[in-house]
Image (cartoon, rainbow, N blue to C red):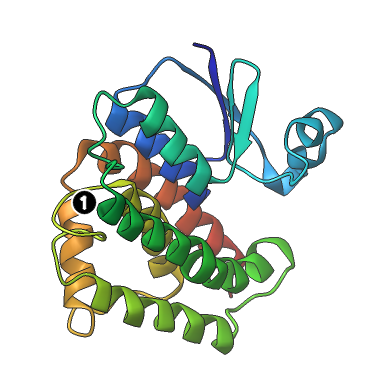
Amino acid sequence: MVLTLYKLDASPPARAVMMTLEALGIRDVEMVDVNLFEGAQFTEEYVKMNPQHTIPALKDDDFAIWDSHAICPYLVSKYGQDDSLYPQDPQRRAVIDQRLHFDSGILFPSLRATVAPVLFLGERSFKPEGLQAIKAGYDFLEKFLDKPYCAGDQLSIADICTSATVSSMSAALPIDADTYPNITAWLDRLSKEEFYTKVNLPGLQQFSGALKSKLL
């Protein structure tokens, strides 16, 4: 096995994959930083591997896959000692898949639309419509979290991927504990997991710092 992860620690999707690797106990991975701010994702070599020129991207020997919502299930399916993070049971997996699609289709787009103009286009404040989209994502997630974890009673890759995004969203729009008690308790629960404290928190600090440096 020769695993190579192309990533940026500040990137929520990259952190999701890194947390999954940590949760699975996979540490023999070559980590390659891709500096989006310098356009490293557009090099000929990178685009040949990943025509979408996004991060993260994973190479497993000669096999390449990108998008955290594809990489994380792949890692569990191939390298997990069991299927607890992505169960084989069709109904449990369907709920996890729904939450992953919710993250990729609702949560992360709201985050990207809000912060990308600040990080990359020179905007000095968040647009109100972006913050409203983040709030709408919070509203949905609060309802989903009627159980301890994002997709039920057990930790899964749905929690890993979604928490990377939501914790980053909170850098733009802080999560009010009175309005969102379920989200607050869920993030607190995850903050006790080693993969979260070891991987997500340092990257989140970088992400938050980059945002603060660009804002008025």
Residue bearing mark 1: 190
* Quadrant holding the C terminus: bottom right
**Which of these two is toward me, 132 or 24?**
24
Residue 119: x %, y % from top left: 64, 62
Residue at position x 46%, y 72% in the image: 172
Instruction: Give the secondary structure at mark 1.
Output: helix
Using the rendered view, name the quadrant where residue 194 is placed.
top left
Q: Amino acid at mark 1?
A: Leu
> Up-down: is 87 above or below 114?
above
Q: Residue at x 58, y 40 (%)?
A: 56
Question: Can residue 41 be seen by looking at this rendering?
Answer: yes
Q: Residue furthest right?
A: 44
Q: Is residue 192 left or right of residue 97?
A: left
Q: Is 121 on the left-hand or right-hand side of 72?
A: right
- Is residue 10 at least partly visible in the picture? no
Q: Position of residue 129 (x, y in %)?
A: 57, 87
Q: Is residue 205 above or below residue 111?
A: above
Q: How many marks?
A: 1
Q: Few, some or many C-alpha atoms within 10 Å of disc 1 (few <14, some 14-19, many ≥20)? A: some
Q: Is residue 198 above or below residue 140?
A: above
At 38% from the left and 19% from the top, the residue drawn is: 27
Rendered location of residue 94, percent (x, y): 35, 57
Residue 16 percent across, percent down from the top left = 42, 45
Q: Residue at x 39, y 62 (%)?
A: 98
Residue sticking out furthest to the front? 90
- Image quadrant assignment for residue 128: bottom right
Q: Nearer the viewer, residue 82 or 187?
A: 82
